[in-house]
Image (cartoon, helix red, strand yellow):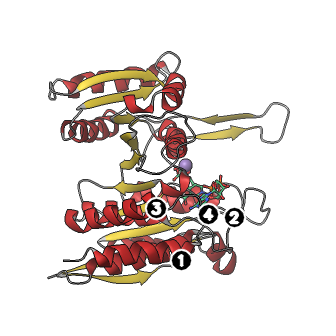
Amino acid sequence: SETIRLAVIGGDGIGPEVVAEGLKVLDAVLVGTDVSVEKTDVELGADHWLKTGEVLADETLERLRGFDAILFGAVGAAPGDARVPSGLIERDLLLKLRFSLDQYVNLRPSLLPAGVASPLADPGEVDFVVVREGTEGPYAGNGGVLRAGTEAEIATEVSVNTAFGVRRVVRYAFEQAAARPRRKLTWIHKTNVLVHAGRLWKRVVEEVAADYPQVTVDYLHIDAATIFMVTDPARFDVIVTDNLFGDIITDLAGAVAGGIGLAASGNINPDRTAPSMFEPVHGSAPDIAGQGIADPTAAILSVAIMLETLGQPEAGARVRAAVAADLSTRGAERRGTTAVGDAIAGAVAARAQ
Ligand code: NAD
Ligand code: IPM
Ligand code: MN
């Protein structure tokens, strides 16, 4: 038997609401297996900072390293909330976790489930996965401000791309592509303008491609990629891209594949030198927090990615099947957060051996 030691960071807004449903489904899928889960709640986020002054203490970060995985809801205040400086929680908590735990693969699958409406009239078969770089790019925090607050102010935000960092995420994406039936990899950048990073990405993609002759490689500029994401999302199989392009394209992908309430992700450390972290793509949604109406499906599917990453593919598949069954019967009815969680947990239990 095996015990998963899981840190749970509900966070802010709808984060704790959706994570509670993810845990409900996790408990249900492990019934009757020889796997158990030991959960530890870790209070972090904007509310926690307002209460205690802690964004992410060194000892909290060190404690988190000791877990097998982290389930994360969402953090951040409402964009206009003057009490919380913009970027404080995002950078010094969420990005610090991704960077410190070396979660260099941000895996964001998009699959338009049967029976779910897309905003596109004729989306075709939407089934692709975005491998977003998670530790570098414009997110690195490399930049600064000169002559702040004056008419002569200069602010820079310099993208950092290392051969090491690009190579490891590109290799991971090729591995994903090689394991999928269509074996197609699209790398996305803006090589026509961002020539320095673009050249590095191109060289690395070409070098790694030599090891994967069975994978078809295709390139798109990010602006054109957004066109195809809307006009022909079925053309995509595996996408690999940098941190910022990946952030933007995955919100769009979420919308195309049935809504942001379904978009799940894993921040994965493939080398297992630190725990991976699983979270919905969406944020704390202050506009609907506390109303019990947030869709917990993204958090539940993040649990499925977690199970797969932790070597429990069968349990992950049962969660996915239960979600698919629930989605196929959802129609236009509007259920609350706990009702959706209950339905999926019930479907998981009904599928138990
Ligand atoms: P958001 O994703 O929180 O919300 C965007 C829109 O989508 C809102 O209208 C919201 O109601 C809706 N939405 C999101 N999740 C939903 C769900 N599960 N069910 C139904 N509707 C849902 O993005 P935002 O408003 O730009 O950001 C709010 C806060 O969250 C900010 O502080 C931001 O920095 C933070 N944020 C955090 C994460 C994270 O923790 N990973 C991700 C994105 C944004
Ligand atoms: C996401 C979010 C984060 C990101 C923010 C909150 C730091 O938008 O997980 O997509 O940009 O990565
Ligand atoms: Mn985002």
The nearer-to-camera label among 3 and 4 is 3
Helix, strand or loop status at disc 2: loop
The residue positioned farthest toward the top in the image shown: 192
Q: CA distance from mark 2 to mark 4?
A: 6 Å
State whether label 4 is within 8 Å of ligand 1: yes
Of the pair 100 and 313, the residue shown nearer to us: 313
Quick one: quadrant of the C terminus? bottom left
Q: Earlier in the sequence, mark 2 or mark 1?
A: 2
Residue that label 4 marks: 284
Name which quarter of the figure residue 150 lies in.
top right
**Residue, disc 1:** 338
Q: Earlier in the sequence, mark 1 or mark 3?
A: 3
The residue shown at (81%, 30%) is 152
User: Upstream in the sequence, badge 2 or badge 3?
Assistant: 2
Q: Are marks 2 and 4 in contact (CB under 8 Å)?
A: yes
Position in image of residue 327 (x %, y %): 45, 59
Q: Position of residue 192 (x, y in %)?
A: 49, 15
* Residue pictured at 26% horizontal, 42% vertical: 172
Secondary structure, mark 1, is helix
Relative to residue 323, is residue 172 depicted above or below? above
Q: CA distance from mark 1 to mark 4?
A: 17 Å
Residue assigned mark 2: 286
Q: Nearer the viewer, residue 197 or 220?
A: 220
Q: Secondary structure at mark 3?
A: loop
Residue named by callout 3: 329
> Residue at image x 48%, y 45%?
257
